Image: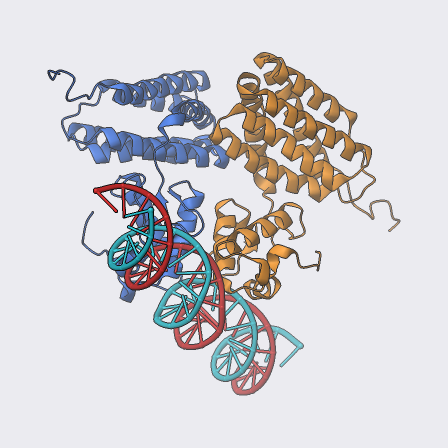
Chain colours: A blue, B orange, C red, D cyan
Amino acid sequence: MSEIISAVEAPAKRKRGQGVGAVYETLKHEILDLTLQPGSPIDEVKLTERFSMSRTPIREALVKLAGEGLVVTLPNRSTVVAPIDFQNLTQFFDALTLMYRVTTRLAATNRTDAEIARIRALQKGYEDAVGAKNVPAMIEVNRDFHAEIARAGKNRYYTDLFERLLDEGRRLLRLYYSSFNDELPQIYLDEHDEMVRAVVDRDVAAADKIAQQHAQQIVRQIQAYITEDRRLNADIAL
Amino acid sequence: MSEIISAVEAPAKRKRGQGVGAVYETLKHEILDLTLQPGSPIDEVKLTERFSMSRTPIREALVKLAGEGLVVTLPNRSTVVAPIDFQNLTQFFDALTLMYRVTTRLAATNRTDAEIARIRALQKGYEDAVGAKNVPAMIEVNRDFHAEIARAGKNRYYTDLFERLLDEGRRLLRLYYSSFNDELPQIYLDEHDEMVRAVVDRDVAAADKIAQQHAQQIVRQIQAYITEDRRLNADIAL
DNA sequence: AAAATATTTTTTGTCGACAAAAAAAATACA
DNA sequence: TGTATTTTTTTTGTCGACAAAAAATATTTT
């Protein structure tokens, strides 16, 4: 975690009414990039020192984060960063796949040229991150790419749910991409390109097909990571 | 709005840590049954008097409600009860229909016998409310019936979204069922029965089909109400 | 030495106060 | 009379304090 205090954390620069939002954004970002580890306790008093503000706005930010499933609060107990729910990944995969399909289909129907430009810029950013082997950027831009497609679909219910699922996916991916040596399959880039093409061409069926294919890739990859044999002592003599 | 102060609103009975929750539940209920009208301002100070507590927990409850889209908060401005978004009903209908289908399908796959019993009890409650022409109860039990089906499907992402959509539907229906003279079509009861049967029989295709049919009915009815000619002076001589 | 109990410290939920921002009311000007 | 400006009042965001609840530590009992 960076010890540099950003401008939004210094009270001299903070306008009244912007406190809660600043804390919320900062903590959300740190939860998503696993700076704040799943299951770890959140210390309100430490946060008052860190953000130089009283506990009230910090608590309000935590209530907001709780509403998004990013932290877990119970009465009279420490708030904790939301654990990763390995037991119910099937639910996650099911919803993620459906949302990939639904949002990409809608984007093929409802997108504007400006949105296509933004989507393309994000895909370029994704290519750059892949080329640079910048894993955190790859994960973040990938999320933004798909979120932009969802927004182009113009159904806020789906966009909201999908963004939440993408954020959850971000945490999962960050758990496994812990070193810069991981290779990301070229197939992701290709599938993104294909997705863009379908959306540009307003080809709903193709959009649906590539979205489902892409989702399956991601699901398979996450599953592969979870089941990967990481036993260090499998061969020791007993 | 009832002026009777319930037990949870009296500080002598309220346990530490239960304040936010009590305010949240009460306000949520009042928003959903339109006691608190869409677009109306929320007066924090009045709520302190009403609930006999300070503004801090009331504000936290409002943050929570905002996270669920039930109120709208902006910095340095009064919180208002969420308006009904008539301009984007297409999005709502689309998502509602999909969630009816998805949750009912999953219920047909994943339900337990205990859940069937609960679903049946709710359907009975719905019948009773229809028989009694108790419109508020009808609207509320209908919501609970479908929410229970969703829970039987055991995917929390879908359940959460669906519950939110059902609540929104509740507000829409309450807007139109303002008198006890409205007749609710028998077709709703029949469709509920058919839904239960499909879920009991674990018939995914039938569940999907009846869910879609039911959703279309509801969408059509809401649309009919919105476009219904309710001008009170349409026939007066000028 | 382990378990149970008591005490102390820390953390959480809430309180009421202060002050910035917004809204309402009053006053001045054209 | 309508508009602009000023003043007053109200509301919102945050503060630091108090006390209940939980956690940690110390002491006593088995």
At x 13%, y 26%, the residue is: A181
B204 versus B181 height, above or below: above
The residue depicted at 32 percent of the width and 40 percent of the height is A39
Q: Position of residue B48 (x, y in %)?
A: 56, 64
Q: Quadrant of residue B11?
A: bottom right
The one of B16 and A213 positioned closer to us in this rendering: B16
Considering only vertical position in the picture, is B186 above or below D18? Answer: above
Image coordinates for residue B31, horizontal then vertical, percent: 62, 49
Question: Where's residue A228, x and y in %?
Answer: 24, 19
Which residue lies most toward the left here?
A: A237
Query: As drawn, is B28 to the left or to the right of D18?
Result: right
Q: How many marks?
A: 0
Q: Residue at x 69, y 18 (%)?
A: B194
Residue found at x 31% / y 53%? A43
Q: Quadrant of the N terminus of chain B?
A: bottom right
Q: Could you say which is closer to the camera, residue D20 or residue C8? A: C8
Q: Is residue A155 left or right of residue A173?
A: right
Whether residue D2 is situated above or below residue B29 in the rendered picture? below
User: Can residue A113 be seen?
Assistant: no
**Residue closest to the eye, A142 or A178:** A178
Position of residue A11 relative to residue B64, above or below, is below
Q: Is residue A102 visible?
A: yes
Q: Camera-side residue: B102 or D21?
A: D21
Q: Position of residue A197 (x, y in %)?
A: 35, 21
